[in-house]
Image: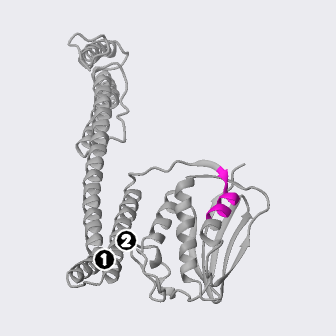
Amino acid sequence: MKISGHMNLFTIRKKIVMASKLMGAILVLSYIFSTRLPFGTDVSLIIWLLFVAVLICVIDLWMARFISKPVSELNEAAGRMADLDFSHLCEVTGRDEFGQLSHSLNVMAGNLQKAFEELEHVNRKLEQDVEQKKRLLAERKELVDNLSHEMKTPLGVIRAYAEGLQDVTDEGKRQDYYEVIIAETERMGSLITTLLDLSALENGAIELTPERFDFVEFVETVAGRLLMDIPDADFELQYELPELPVYVHTDKGRMEQVLNNLIVNAKRNVRPGGILKLSLTERDGMLDFSIYNQGHCIPEENLSKIWTKFYRDKHTKYSGSGLGLAIVAQILSMQHLVYGVANRPDGVEFYFSIPIVR
């Protein structure tokens, strides 16, 4: 704010000049008045000196109020700004230089505060960018390491059977070798696709596309495809589903992945002749899904580990990718849904809850 050199009558200099002139006039008039008092010269002089003392005290109070106090407050405000504390404004007001200086300091403090906030925002953004780059590099390294580790077995099998083809002359045996190589190649392709999909979900590269649909019919369709009419199925299938439609609002394709992985996991781990039970239950505006299979319980110390990539239960006879439950956890977490796993008497139950919509 520009301070003009041609101030109005309220400038400090003019105040002091006017106060000096007024004090001089009062001193002269009071002296003349004291000489006309009906007292002796000494008494009149004493009275005049007492008046001068009172006048000096009044002037001192005036100076303290209009000069010393504003200067002190301005000095404190400047000190706070020097310490980068812009939270308290200078409270000196008026139309003189002190008031204008106070206003200028407050404007400057506001501008500096805004500049520091913008600088902090930029610093936080830079820190976030650096952390994001570090995280992406770490995830990329983890992805490469996981792929390298998981590819060793199928590549070893392919190499062994490819070398064996050179020495095998029996056509039937050669066909068996070809089928093994093709199966391992497909296994690698499936593993790479699944791992890349999980990595994209974790990085936020894939967004969910929710829609409203009947979850009861949806579960019946997915479960029916995976569990019905299975040749030589050695387990007892039990259903507990609502009779009426229950609607939810979620990504249908991703929830199909969730159901697929949970149902396949239960089907692989149910013991021969055991029960596999699938249920949907309405509760306080939520729809609870659960799937239970009789079989080996999960060691308590491993319950939290089963959602991690490449976890495999040593009791299972199937050698899956170890990514199915990690994908389930990621999809449900992206929707902030409650999910979990628990050991039940003689088996394991996986569950999650999803809000019901009308």
Q: Judge by depth and name the residue closer to the eye, 170 or 242.
A: 170
Is residue 216 shown in magenta?
yes
For the residue labelled by badge 2, is the local secondary structure a helix, a strand or a loop?
Answer: helix
Q: Judge by depth and name the residue closer to the eye, 43 or 220.
A: 220
Work out whether 296 lies above or below 186. Answer: below
For the residue labelled by badge 1, is the local secondary structure a helix, a strand or a loop?
Answer: helix
Q: Please report contact status of discs 1 and 2: CB closer than 8 Å, yes or no.
A: yes
Q: Residue 346, position in %: x, y?
A: 63, 90
Work out whether 171 lies above or below 215. Answer: below
Work out whether 276 lies above or below 206. Answer: below
Amino acid bearing label 1? Pro
Q: Residue 334, position in %: x, y?
A: 49, 57
**Quadrant where the N terminus is found in the figure:** top left
Q: Along the horizontal axis of the image, is 43 left or right of 330?
A: left
Residue position marked by numbered label 1 in the rendering? 154
Q: In terms of image quadrants, where is residue 287?
A: bottom right
Q: Residue 249, position in %: x, y?
A: 62, 51
Segment colored magenta: 213-222
Amino acid bearing label 2? Arg
Q: Main secondary structure of the magenta part?
A: helix
Q: In terms of image quadrants, where is residue 338?
A: bottom right
Residue position marked by numbered label 2 in the rendering? 187
